[in-house]
Image: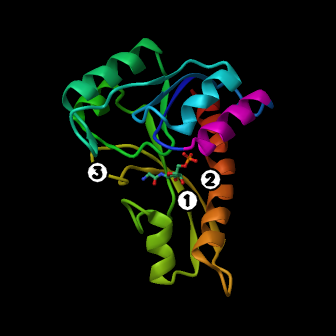
Amino acid sequence: MRVVILGSGRGSNAESILVAQQAGRLSRARVVGIFSDQPEAGILSLGLRFNVPAMFIDPAPFKTKLEGEGETRFIAAVQAARPDLVVLAGFMRVLKPGFLNAFAGKIINLHPSLLPSFPGLDGIGQAFRRGVKFAGCTVHGVTAEVDGGPILDQAAVRVAPGETLDSLTARIHALEHTLLPTVIARLSEVE
Ligand code: GAR
């Protein structure tokens, strides 16, 4: 299963996928490309380290969504990698029908909350401020509804007495780093 990863940030989840691949834990999946909408994103440095093509793609003209010329550039770059699966690992842009239709049924997203609670930005902060007793992360199929597609898997932790936003964030990131590679491995086995 050919996997393309899209991300905007430091890339710790992309790293967890690549580490799992190196360790032989990705089953039949293989990362074939990493693309970012941020030229300085840490995720791009993984390319050299893991010997995978990694590239900035100009997302202009919009700031928070992928549409118009930027969308066309992303579709072309991702299509060239011939993915069976497109993984959004911290890709902080809303996808529109052009991209969604080009890779229909092949896109999954990692979100740092127990969906359907706390979609959108800052899922961990939203949950923490709401005082939930369980928090976690979700991997779901991507549809036109933001953070609304079918849930593939989730992982949860109990919020500890005296928990801070920082400690909860660290614990949820640790859950993400196991959950996402596990889901990818599972998907590759049924492909
Ligand atoms: C992750 O926590 C992921 O759940 C979140 O961005 C972070 C990326 O971290 N995604 C979203 O909030 C999407 N709505 P990373 O760059 O270290 O993998």
Ligand 1 lies under 8 Å from the Cβ of mark 3: no
Range covered by the magenta-colored residues: 10-22
- Asked if the residue at label 2 sits under 8 Å from ligand 1, the reply is yes
Q: Are marks 2 and 1 in contact (CB under 8 Å)?
A: yes
Amino acid marked by disc 1: Cys
Residue 137's label in the rendered image is 1
Quadrant into which the C terminus falls: top right
Residue 163 painted magenta: no
Residue under label 3, please give it. 145
Considering every residue shown, the one lying at the far front of the view is: 40
Q: Residue at x 29, y 30 (%)?
A: 99
Are discs 2 and 3 less than 8 Å apart at CB? no
Mark 2 or 1, nearer chain start:
1
Mark 2 vs 3, N-terminal side: 3
Query: Does the beta carbon of the residue at mark 1 sit less than 8 Å from ligand 1?
Result: yes
Residue nearest the viewer, comparing 60 with 21: 60
Residue depicted at 63% across the width and 78% down the height: 159
Residue 148 in percent (x, y) is at: 35, 54
Badge 2: few (under 14), some or many (20 or more) residues near its Cα, within 10 Å?
many
Q: Main secondary structure of the magenta part?
A: helix
Horizontal arrangement in the rendering, residue 155 relative to residue 75 (left or right):
right
SS at mark 1 in the image: strand
Q: Which badge, 1 or 3, comes first in the chain's sequence?
A: 1
Residue with the mark numbered 2: 176
